[in-house]
C-alpha cells in the first residue's frame, strides 16, 4: 500500500509541476485562417494588457490582422483603417514608439507590390496614420523583416529593414536599409547609405540588435538563410559608436559564431546560465535538405564556444523562430522553437546551468504545422509567459489556423514584470539592460535581460521584461542601465507584480 501511495504521489507531483500550455479554442483568434508570417504580442492601445498583431501573406494579396485583448482569453478583431484593410503581401513587422509620444507605432514590411513597406503612426483609439516621411524619398522600400533600435543613442528609435536581395523571385537585388530618426515634428528619417550593413547583398532573413559586447551601443546580427540551401556564414556588425564617437559598423570576424556556415534565420543573445554575459542561439531552416541542427554558443568571458551536446543542438528541424522566456518561473530562460515543413515545434527546459531537456508531451510540441512566427508574452498578466504560434500553408489563399497557448503551469513559483519608460532614452525603453538579483535555492542569482533584444521571426515579443523568481518573495536588487547611460537601482522589491520603471525617477 505504501509503495502504491508513493507511485501515486510521484505521478501527481510530476503532473502538477510539469510545463502546461492550454490551447485556446474559442473566438476569432482560434478559428481565423490567416496564412500568417509574423506575429507579435503588443500593447498597442496602452491599456496594460497584450494584444496581437499578425502580418499575413496570401497570393496575390492578403489582409493584416489586429486583435484587441478583451480579457478572459477573448481577442476581437479591430478595424484599424488602412492597417487592416489594405491588401498586401506582408512578411515581417515591428512595433516601437518612434516619436516618443507614449504610443507604439507600427512598421509593416511588404513585398511583391508597388506599395512598398509602410510606417504607421499610432494616433490612439484604434487609429493609425501613414507616415510618408520615413523613406527619404524612396518610392518603394521592399523587404522581409524590420527592427527598431536607437543605434546612435540620441533618444529616438531608428529603423532597420532587412532585404532578401533576390532570395525571393520578383524582388530586386538591393542591400538592407538603415533609416536614422531625425527626431523632428515631421517624423522624418535619413537613410544611412555608406555602411557595410547597407552595401552588402545576401539572402538576409531576420535582424536582431543587441549590445553583445556590453560597451553601451547596439550591435547588429543578421541571419542570411539562402533559399537554395547553400550554407554560408551569417553577417554580424559591431557598432563602433562607443570607440569612435561616430556611427559606423565593423563586420565581426574571426569568431566561431561569425565563421560557422549556417542557414541562418533568427539570432538571439540571452544569458542562459545566469553568469552575467550573453550567450547566443541561432535557428537554421534547411528546408531544401529536410532540416538542420540549430546552434548554441556559450560565452566564456574571453571566448565564445559552440555547444555540441544535447537535444537543443542535435534535433533536426526546419527551424525559423526561437523565443526565450522563463516559462516555468524557476529563475532561468527556456526556449521554444518554431519549425516549418509540417514538423512539430520544440520546447527545451533549462536547468539553470545551461543544460536543456526536450519536453515532448503536449499540444504545443506534438502538433505538426508549418510554423513561421512565434511570439512570447504574458497576455493575461498572471505572471506566466504565454505563446502565440502562427502557421502557414505556403502562399495560397485560405491559410491555416494559428495557436494561442495560455501558460497554466502550476508550481507556485514567483515572478515580476517590468515595463521600461525612457525619459532621456527612447520612450519604449528598447536597449535598456536590467540586472535582477534574488535568492534561488539559498544562493544569490543575478538574471539579465535587455529590452527588445529577445528577437523572434518576423515579429516581436512582449516589450516588458519578465523574470521568474523560483520561491523568492523579495528581490534583493534591481539595476536598470538605460541607453542614455543613466543607471537606476532599487532594493527590496516585492515579487508577483507588474511594475513600471521610469528612467531616473521611479519603479512602481
Image (cartoon, rainbow, N blue to C red):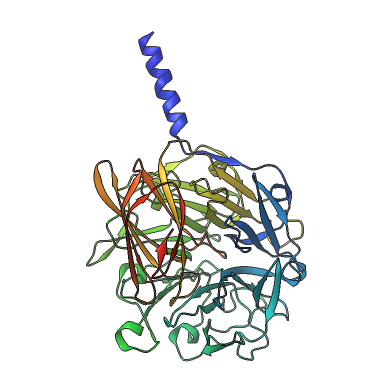
- Number of on-image labels: 0
Expressed as whole percent of the image width and height from the top left, the position of residue 338 reads 53, 54
Q: Does the image show residue 213? A: yes
Residue most toward the left?
302
In the rendered view, tell whether residue 123 sits above or below residue 42.
Answer: below
Estimate the x, y position of residue 147 in percent, counting from the top left.
52, 72
Judging depth in this view, the residue of 451 and 353 nearest the camera is 451
Residue 309 coordinates in the image, percent (x, y): 32, 50
Considering the image in quadrants, where does the C terminus appear? Answer: bottom left
Asked where in the image residue 489 lies, by quadrant, the reply is bottom left
- Residue drawn 77% across the image and 60% down it: 397
Which residue appears at 43% of the width and 57% of the height? 294
- Front-most of residues 269 and 316: 269
Left-right relation of 31 to 40? right
Please state which of residues 185 and 105 is positioned toward the viewer in this rendering. Answer: 185
Residue at x 57% of width, y 48% of height: 380
Amino acid at each position: 500500500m505504501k509503495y502504491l501511495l508513493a507511485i501515486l504521489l510521484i505521478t501527481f507531483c510530476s503532473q502538477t509541476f510539469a510545463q502546461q500550455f492550454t490551447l485556446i479554442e474559442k473566438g476569432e483568434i482560434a478559428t481565423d485562417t490567416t496564412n500568417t508570417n509574423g506575429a507579435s504580442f503588443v500593447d498597442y492601445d496602452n491599456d496594460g494588457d497584450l494584444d496581437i498583431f499578425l502580418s499575413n501573406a496570401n497570393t496575390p494579396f492578403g489582409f493584416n490582422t489586429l486583435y484587441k485583448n478583451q480579457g478572459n482569453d477573448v481577442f476581437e478583431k479591430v478595424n484599424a483603417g488602412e492597417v487592416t484593410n489594405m491588401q498586401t503581401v506582408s512578411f515581417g513587422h515591428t512595433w516601437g514608439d518612434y516619436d516618443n509620444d507614449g504610443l507604439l507605432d507600427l512598421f509593416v514590411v511588404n513585398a511583391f507590390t508597388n506599395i512598398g513597406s509602410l510606417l504607421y503612426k499610432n494616433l490612439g483609439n484604434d487609429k493609425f496614420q501613414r507616415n510618408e516621411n520615413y523613406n527619404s524619398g524612396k518610392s518603394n522600400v521592399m523587404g522581409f523583416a524590420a527592427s527598431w533600435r536607437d543605434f546612435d543613442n540620441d533618444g529616438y528609435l531608428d529603423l532597420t529593414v532587412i532585404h532578401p536581395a533576390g532570395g525571393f523571385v520578383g524582388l530586386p537585388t538591393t542591400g538592407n536599409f538603415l533609416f536614422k530618426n531625425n527626431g523632428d515634428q515631421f517624423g522624418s528619417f535619413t537613410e544611412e547609405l555608406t555602411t557595410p550593413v547597407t552595401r552588402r547583398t545576401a539572402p538576409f532573413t531576420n535582424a536582431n540588435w543587441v549590445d553583445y559586447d556590453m560597451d553601451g551601443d547596439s550591435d547588429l546580427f543578421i541571419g542570411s538563410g539562402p533559399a537554395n540551401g547553400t550554407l554560408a556564414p551569417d553577417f554580424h556588425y559591431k557598432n563602433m559608436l562607443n570607440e569612435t564617437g561616430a556611427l559606423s559598423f565593423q563586420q565581426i570576424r574571426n569568431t566561431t559564431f561569425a565563421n560557422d556556415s549556417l542557414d541562418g534565420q533568427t539570432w538571439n543573445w540571452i544569458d542562459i546560465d545566469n553568469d552575467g554575459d550573453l550567450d547566443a542561439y541561432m535557428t537554421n531552416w534547411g528546408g531544401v535538405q529536410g532540416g538542420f541542427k540549430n546552434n548554441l554558443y556559450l560565452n566564456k568571458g574571453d571566448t565564445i564556444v559552440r555547444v555540441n551536446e544535447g537535444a537543443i543542438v542535435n534535433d533536426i528541424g526546419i527551424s525559423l523562430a526561437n523565443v526565450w522566456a522563463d516559462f516555468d518561473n524557476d529563475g532561468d530562460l527556456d526556449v521554444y522553437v518554431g519549425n516549418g515543413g509540417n514538423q512539430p515545434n520544440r520546447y527545451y527546459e533549462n536547468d539553470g546551468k545551461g543544460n536543456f531537456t526536450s519536453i515532448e508531451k503536449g499540444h504545443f510540441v506534438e502538433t505538426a504545422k508549418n510554423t513561421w512566427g512565434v511570439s512570447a508574452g504574458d497576455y493575461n498578466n498572471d505572471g506566466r509567459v504565454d505563446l502565440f504560434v502562427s502557421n502557414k500553408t505556403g502562399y495560397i489563399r485560405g491559410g491555416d489556423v494559428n495557436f494561442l497557448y495560455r501558460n497554466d503551469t502550476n508550481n507556485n513559483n514567483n515572478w515580476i514584470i517590468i515595463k521600461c519608460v525612457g525619459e532621456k532614452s527612447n520612450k519604449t525603453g528598447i536597449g535598456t539592460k536590467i540586472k535582477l538579483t534574488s535568492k534561488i535555492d539559498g544562493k544569490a542569482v543575478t538574471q539579465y535581460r535587455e529590452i527588445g533584444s529577445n528577437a523572434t521571426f518576423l515579429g516581436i515579443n512582449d516589450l516588458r521584461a519578465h523574470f521568474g523568481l523560483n520561491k523568492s518573495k523579495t528581490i534583493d536588487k534591481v539595476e536598470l542601465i538605460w541607453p542614455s547611460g543613466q543607471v537606476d537601482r532599487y532594493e527590496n522589491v516585492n515579487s508577483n507584480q507588474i511594475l513600471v520603471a521610469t528612467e531616473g525617477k521611479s519603479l512602481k
